Amino acid sequence: MKFKIEKGKQKKPIRACVYGPAGIGKSTFAGQFPEPLFIDVEGGTHELDVSRFPVPENWSELLEMIDAVIAEPKICKTLVIDTIDRAEVLLTNALLAEKKADSIEAYGGGYGKGYTALQERFTKDFLNRLDRVIAKGVNVVLVAHAMMRKFESPEDPPYDRWELKVSKKVAPVVKEWCDLLLFANYDAMIVEDDNGKAKARGKAKRVIYT
């Protein structure tokens, strides 16, 4: 047989995405990974004692920062992108500038072409680059905000659930790319009041759901 069969666990860099509501501690959690280097797309890590690039001004600059890690992978053990929803905004601005379009809905003449272009370029330019970072032995952690979005279930009535705060076509490719998809939130339970109405009772404890 010309193929070598490998057995057992293989230790490789981690692809992770952590998302949750504002202020839950996503960036702080990402900063606990080994030797993190932040691409602080939002400019919100000033209170964290971490290494960081300058805030990228546009999509090209963000990609150049990732390329810098590929060229010199020893500068960190973990690359953190904080946040991917802000990164998607930079990509959107770049696409609109290329086509001189006023909105992503009008991009390329409409009919969803803008969102398809977002998905394709996010995968090709961004996630594929991060695969090259992984290949250099560096962990990658994506940070994202969360938003409530209606979920259409084939078995149950539609209901709201937390989702990545990125466009509907980008969210699935991010989820598929990750080894770890983590949702951070406050621990809460549903209770009934004296009138029989359900409400959430939150606690100070923060939890991560896998």
Image (cartoon, rainbow, N blue to C red):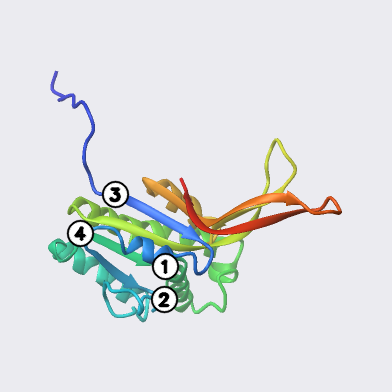
* Quadrant assignment for the N terminus: top left
Which residue is depicted at the point 13% across and 65% down? 72
* Proximity of marks 3 and 4: CB atoms separated by less than 8 Å: no
Which residue is depicted at the point 26% across and 71% down? 65
Q: Which residue is mark 3?
A: 14
The percent position of residue 55, horizontal first and vertical second, equals 34, 79
Amino acid type of the residue tagged 2 in the rendering: Glu
How far, Cα to Cα, is label 1 from label 3? Answer: 17 Å
Label of residue 42 in the image: 2
Mark in the foreground, 4 or 1:
4
How far, Cα to Cα, is label 3 from label 4? Answer: 10 Å
User: Tag 4: Cα neighbours inside 10 Å, few (<14), some, or many (≥20)?
Assistant: some
How far, Cα to Cα, is label 4 from label 2? Answer: 21 Å
* Proximity of marks 4 and 2: CB atoms separated by less than 8 Å: no
Amino acid type of the residue tagged 3 in the rendering: Ile
Q: Please indicate whether residue 155 sits to the left or right of residue 55 in the image.
A: right
How far, Cα to Cα, is label 4 from label 1? Answer: 19 Å
Amino acid type of the residue tagged 1 in the rendering: Thr
Label of residue 66 in the image: none
User: Tag 1: Cα neighbours inside 10 Å, few (<14), some, or many (≥20)?
Assistant: many
Which badge, 3 or 2, comes first in the chain's sequence? 3
User: Tag 2: Cα neighbours inside 10 Å, few (<14), some, or many (≥20)?
Assistant: some
User: Tag 3: Cα neighbours inside 10 Å, few (<14), some, or many (≥20)?
Assistant: some
> Which secondary structure lies at badge 3?
loop
Q: Which residue is mark 1?
A: 83
* Proximity of marks 2 and 1: CB atoms separated by less than 8 Å: yes
Q: Which residue is mark 4?
A: 77
> Which secondary structure lies at badge 2?
loop
Which badge, 4 or 2, comes first in the chain's sequence? 2
The percent position of residue 117, horizontal first and vertical second, equals 47, 62
> Which secondary structure lies at badge 1?
loop
> Which secondary structure lies at badge 4?
loop
